[in-house]
Image (tube, rainbow, N blue to C red):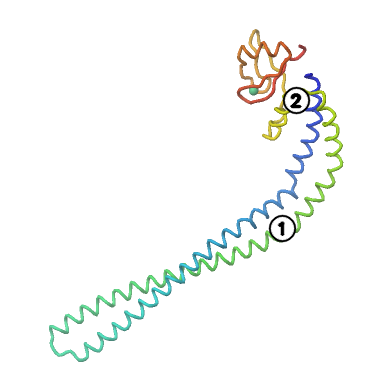
Amino acid sequence: MIEKILEYQTVDGELRDIEVSLIQSDERKKASAAQAILKNANDNIARLDSKAEELVTQYATLSKLCEKLEEAQKDYENIVETCESGEELNYIKKKAQALADEINLMTVNVENLAKEIKSTLDEFAKLRQDNKKATAQYKEFAPKYNDLKASKEEDMKKIKVKLAKLEKGIDPNVLENYKKKRKDKIFPIVYSAKISGKIFLCGRCGTELPMAYTGSLKKGEIVECDSCHRLLYLENN
Ligand SMILES: [Zn+2]
């Protein structure tokens, strides 16, 4: 019983080695990095689009305000020319100064807006450049990765046939549990428990096993470590 699952794990280890070599291959890393950039690009474009729209609205509002202020300034200039009383002139001059200050502030706002528009355009340009690079990288490495995968397919198929045969001698519950852990990227999954005096320990992480597990192990059953979740058995049982 235990031998079967151990044998299964050894063969499964060969399959896992191939899977890991594919995942860690330069071809896959480069293809998936490019794919991630391309996927993000849509979000970035949408974000920049809405920012551009907002900037256009801001620009229109500021332009209108500037026009109004300039008109008001001209009006004051006309009034100053025709003004006869000194008191009135002072009042008008003060008003004109306040208007000039407002115009200065508005000029700063317009300059800031222009800077923001420029940085948005730069961002668009960079996005376009990154996208172009990522597209080229994906086009180069996706087929290379597919070729690499195809080159391993025969070996993987052979191992899977072996595994299917070995499955028949394994308790379905144990097998199901094993497969679940394999999906959770735990490997190796099955370990022998260690005995230290009267204490039983997990062979992987060294956690002390509860007394209740000891009886099961002695009966030749498999238990699960509460800490690292490996499947444990008792050797030479
Ligand atoms: Zn453990």
Give how far across and how far down residue 183 sits, in percent.
69, 35
Quarter occupied by residue 152:
top right
Tag 1 secondary structure: helix
Q: Is mark 1 within 8 Å of ligand 1?
A: no
Image quadrant of ligand 1 equals top right
* Residue 137: mark in rendering: 1
Q: Label 1 near label 2: C-beta < 8 Å?
A: no
> In this view of the protein, which residue sits in the foreground, 65 or 197?
65
* Residue at x 70% of width, y 14% of height: 217
Tag 2 secondary structure: helix
Q: Is residue 158 above or below residue 82?
A: above
Query: At label 2, which amino acid type do we have?
Result: Pro
Mark 2 or mark 1, earlier in chain: 1
Q: On the image, numbered disc 2 is attached to which residue? A: 172
Q: Is residue 153 left or right of residue 128?
A: right
Give how far across and how far down residue 171 sits, in percent.
76, 22
Quarter of the C terminus within the rendering: top right
Q: Is residue 22 left or right of residue 122?
A: right
Q: Residues within 10 Å of mark 1 (few under 14, many from 20)?
A: some
* Residue at x 51% of width, y 66% of height: 120
